[in-house]
Amino acid sequence: GNREDFSQSSAMGVRGLQGFVGSTCPHVCTVVNFKDLVVQHRSQFPGCVPTVVVDAMCCLRYWYTPESWICGGQWREYFSALRDFIKAFTAVGIKLVFFFDGMVEQGKRDEWVRRRLKNSKEIGRIFHYIKSHRQQPGRNMFFIPSGLALFTRFALKTLGQETFCSLREADYEVASYGLQHNCLGILGEDTDYLIYDTCPYFSISELCLESLDTVMLCREKLCEHLGLHLMDLPLLACLLGNDVIPEGMFESFRYKCLSSYTSVKENFDKKGNVILAVSDHISKVLRLYQGEKKLEDILPLGANKALFYKGVASYLLPGQKSPWFFQKPKDVITLDKQVITMSSDSESKQDISKCTDLESRQEVPVCTDLESRQEVSMCADPESRQEVPVCIDPESRQEVLMFTDPESRQEVLMCTGPESRQEVPMCMDPESRQEVPMCTEPESRQEISTYIDSECKQEVLTYTLPEFKQKVPICADSIPKQVYMCAHPEITQKLHVATDSEFKLDTSMCTQPEIKPEDPVNMGPEMKQQVTMVLDTEILKVARTRHVQAESYLVYSIMSSGEIECSNTLEDELDQALPSQAFIYRPVRQRVYSLLLGDCKDGTSTCPAVKEWFVYPGNPLRHPDLVRPLQMTVPGGTPSLKILWLNQEPEVQARRLDTLLACFNLSSCREELQAVESPLAALCCLLIYLFVQVDTLCLEDLHAFIAQALCLQGKSTAQLINLQPDYINPRAVQLGSLLVRGLTTLVLVNSACGCPWKTSDFMPWNVFDGKLFHQKYLQSEKGYSVEALLEQNRSRLTKFHTLKAVVSKACMKEGRRIVGRAHWGTHHTGRWGRQGSSSHPPGSGYGHSGQGQPWRDQGPGNRQYEHDPWRRY
């Protein structure tokens, strides 16, 4: 899952391996010095710049050195620490390349959810501690500030570092980059790096920045100790359990290994014994059958067969093959009493036929294209109901077999190459709709893959874009239980196929909901809606490039998969008056969805919904929230993404700003905001939005937000470090996190609109400091004068009144009068959300009619988590 929470949990990667290496075979860990390693690397690779590839998600805890973490983040101090980190390496001639997780892989979603729920409990304990002690808990309860991963990306780019965002979980791309670029090593904290066959792995937690000493974990020494080969390690990792294979899946198998393992030493812990026992079984029992028998014949895989193959294959880097995958004879593939043979029609360029199995009544389409030399066949076994796609390339004689495990609903592809005589399985989860390569045409390097939607029994063929390896569905027809597969532009009569000559491929993405008309509202967890996004390939390429270059936030995920996530925020579950940031900023995201995915004109259920995995109090995360785009009104009409992103004409910049303000529903405030100097315009926009949305924010809160932003500009990093608030207030903690989540929302909106504002304008080190805000909040709450809040600085006083006037005037336009706490009286209920606003918590009914009920009428904290049908799919 998302490894941002390494700060909360050090157990990532292979279960028990970190402790085993530390206690049982410490010789695997060697103290090394980066200065010495540079000398060795230069002699080994002359002319090559020594490069360390950094798994940034693992390093966030190490980098976040500020003592205070509870108030929303000490961003100026953090930026300074990052600068020092980079300087230490560049001083000895090391180039750093940083990778961040860009997406949560579907196979790891359960693990992601498990960690988020665990973090939620920890946050509850943190707030309990704050209320009891009025101070920050010790470092043992440390929780990384909201938005740390996102803003670290921008900080590193600001500091001139090469920074990438992954298209899958970053550890694979880190290992792959390290191998392909002859890197000096990988810097991170994940035992998966002991499993990948790649460049050396160094521990970030053991790094001493002053001396550049750290610990190298040597996979060759680990293999020697365990009696294994390097390519046995992926098998070991899956049998022990990792982020793909749940730890409990092979518990009984490990126990059997342990029982028969005789060379047990008393001082080993149980997990150490287990690792030795499983390794012993691999080397002495399983290896006898390596390549001769299928893994499912020598291991108790059962219904988990597909998932297990997926787990092993996930460690194979480009060009690597596993000796553990069974080699079948060529040309004939037998599976469950079936023989599948391939034939092609030499007369026609393309022939499509279907054969029907009368017993199973399933149709099997076959598509042959002699120009691309590819055949695809689908065959179904009536007993197992397994569908088997097969693809053969006559030139390379490659065979590809896919089989589906009906219980785990996982699919595994087996690819056989003529030279290696080995099969490489690659897999995917049909629920995630992630595609898996089936066959590669050597000339075009385009991959064809298929996925099967388990809900609507649809199979969709996809291409991989050769320039940037993005898989795009070619066609998907909504007729149930029937399959259309095509890989050629001639077959377009039933499909909307857009051809982009630059990519030499056909793409089509469409939304085909399969919704029973008699049950339009309450669909429950089995809601049969398949969402795919209609995309322009040129725009998709731009979005993808910006994602990979770490220049945008969430945009590419929305456009490609229609699925996004947001990790935990320091929010007090017991404070009913302050809503979760997930709800407050949801209307903004909905308008961004409308911009990125196309308007939903009629408000009907055919609109594509985005799946949001957002953590908020009370959300069990069993399903994502299904959130529909929300129409927005841009003066002069909503510009296309091509205009916003690609048009260089000077007048377009004004349209970009119009679109950004429309996303916040603040088009009426354009004139006032333009009068505000940089970098405070973006902050003002955010404050107006917050105060319009949340009735429980008062004048004292506004004073604190503005005062801290103005005072921050005149303070040095050293002054901020020495600042100490009198005590810690739980409401101020939540407000600090709320503002920072607002800044991350600004990153999303700004990147979606083509960057009308400079990114630096809403980087937290320029506009927010947690301790400084906390100090101003406490002072404002005590009734300090504005002059005292501004530390008697007259130039700040003028700016303060200007900013306050802008926010107050804009709020009045929306019918929101900001008053002090003294004016609340006894009748203030702590309700939030404005009349006509579209911030609707789960259970409000929003999403069905598109109208929704204003939260103002619902009373404080009335979040009906369990009964909202739009949270289930």
Image (cartoon, rainbow, N blue to C red):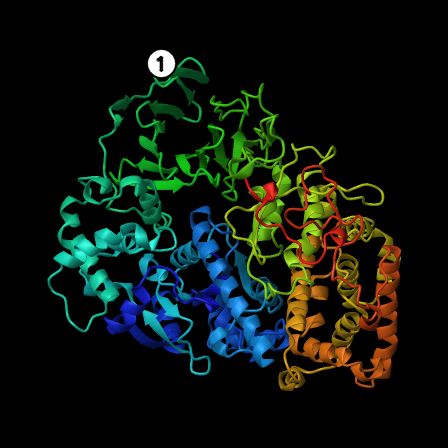
Residue 807 visible in the current orientation: yes
Q: Secondary structure at mark 1?
A: loop
User: Toward the viewer: 840 or 741?
Assistant: 840
User: Toward the viewer: 540 or 128?
Assistant: 128
Residue 544 visible in the current orientation: no
Mark 1 = which residue? 358
Q: Position of residue 613 (x, y in %)?
A: 55, 51
Question: With respect to residue 583, does 158 lie above or below?
Answer: below
Name the residue furthest front.
826
Which amino acid type is shown beneath numbered disc 1?
Leu
Total numbered badges shown on the rendered structure: 1
Relative to 598, is 278 on the left or the right? left
Question: With respect to residue 358, does 437 lie above or below?
Answer: below
Q: Position of residue 437 (x, y in %)?
A: 41, 38
Q: Position of residue 392 (x, y in %)?
A: 35, 28
Quadrant for residue 283, please give it: bottom left
